Structures are given as structure tokens and as C-alpha cells.
Image (spheres, rainbow, N blue to C red):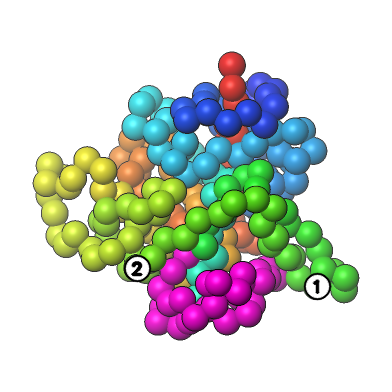
Amino acid sequence: MMMPRLMGRQQETHPQISLSPLRGPFIQAFRTAREDNLTLASNAQADWALMHGLSANETFWTGTMIVHEKRGVAFSEVVRSGRFLFEVPRRYRGWRNTALVMQDPHYDIDDDMLQTSLLITPTGRFSNVRNLAFDDGFYNVGTAGIPRGHMLGALESDQVPEGARYLKSVLESREGAFIGAILRNASPEHRRKVMHSMPLSIHKFAFIDARAD
């Protein structure tokens, strides 16, 4: 089992990616990274590693957090998904079919005053993905490697464009608002799948972090 190696919060285009031996829901991955002064790898960093040799029979959390409303529903002041809450910046209120995207370490997750909800708060710059994809299938990708636009249709494996990724979603994201981190799978047959809407509170997987040499 691969053990984590310590690093600071340095930013590199293609840092080294290591799978941690620890498993847990995303909130545990997030808090462990904070306690150990680590940075969870972004979806884009993980994607590059997966295309360049990272291989393991593991599904893992990335540090890319997305927030979206139900398909066709405009952002209002707040998005709620399970225990998670996100206050939508004023400039994005009214936008539809859009994901707001944050990268670790540029957000915090804190209990509210009553300890009944977890507040997601951006602490730095974040981006958006318009025309967000909701249904399973191959798509071109937008900001942060997140599937967007029109589905590419039924394609044979040798017909799929190299940069396309397969969105694997869950019922919660197709039928309601969602706040969650992107999951990836390091097995060769699933490395092109982007699972951007899995419930944070009930799934336990290994997480990764970006570590500079």
C-alpha cells in the first residue's frame, strides 16, 4: 500500500499524485488534508496523472468541488444539498445549467452555528462551467475538466475523441441541486470517467493529494 509523502501547498501544473492508504467520506479526506498540511489534487491534475501512468483499482476523491442547481433551475441566494450549504455569489444568481467550481485549498468546510449543516465557503478564486452536462455519456470538457455541452452520442471506443470524458452521474445530480467533490477511478478501463456528483456523506473511497518533489 502506497504511503503519503509530505508536501506544502505548492502549485504545479503536473505535480506528483499519490493515493493515500486512508479511506473515508470526502469530509474526512478534506479534514485529514488540512490537519497534515496537504493539498487534494484537482480533477485536472488527477486526469493528467491517469492519462500518464497512474493506475490502481481504486476510486478516489479529488479536491475539485462543484455546486450546481437542478437542471433548468436558476441559482438563487443559496444552494442546499443534503447537509451542505453554499451561498451563491450575487453575480451568479439567475444563471442556469451552470456549475461553480472550487479547487482545494481555495475553500473551507465548516459547521454552522447549530451544527446541523456544513457550509462551503470559497476562500479564493473559483470558476464556472456553463451548459453543464447532467446525463451519463461522453462529452467534451470545459473548465477543470468537467463534462459540458451536448453528449457525443453512441461511439465505439476508437471513435471517442482523445480529450472527451465520460460523465457518470447519480440520481441526486440529475434530479436536484448538488454540492460535491469530483471522483475519479484509477483502473485503466475507468480512467476516462468523471464522477462529478456522488454524495459526499455516504461513499467511502481513497483520496489523493498533489505532492511536489
Residue at disc 1, secondary structure: loop
Q: Residues within 10 Å of mark 2 (few under 14, many from 20)?
A: some
Say whether disc 2 or disc 1 marks the residue closer to the N-terminus.
1
Q: Which residue is at a point 65% across and 69% down the rendered structure image? A: 86
The disc placed on residue 116 is: 1
Locate residue 157 relative to residue 96 in the image: left or right.
left
Q: Which residues are magenta?
A: 70-99
Residue at disc 2, secondary structure: loop
**Is residue 170 something one can see in this rendering?**
no
Closer to us: 181 or 14: 14
Q: Which residue is at a point 24% across and 65% down the rendered structure image? A: 150
Q: Which residue is at a point 53% across and 28% down the rendered structure image? A: 12
Q: Is residue 84 magenta?
A: yes
Q: Is residue 151 magenta?
A: no
Q: Which residue is at a point 79% across and 38% down the rendered structure image? A: 35
**Is residue 71 something one can see in this rendering?**
yes
From the top left corner, tell me how far across and down residue 175 is, in percent.
45, 79
Q: Which residue is mark 2?
A: 131
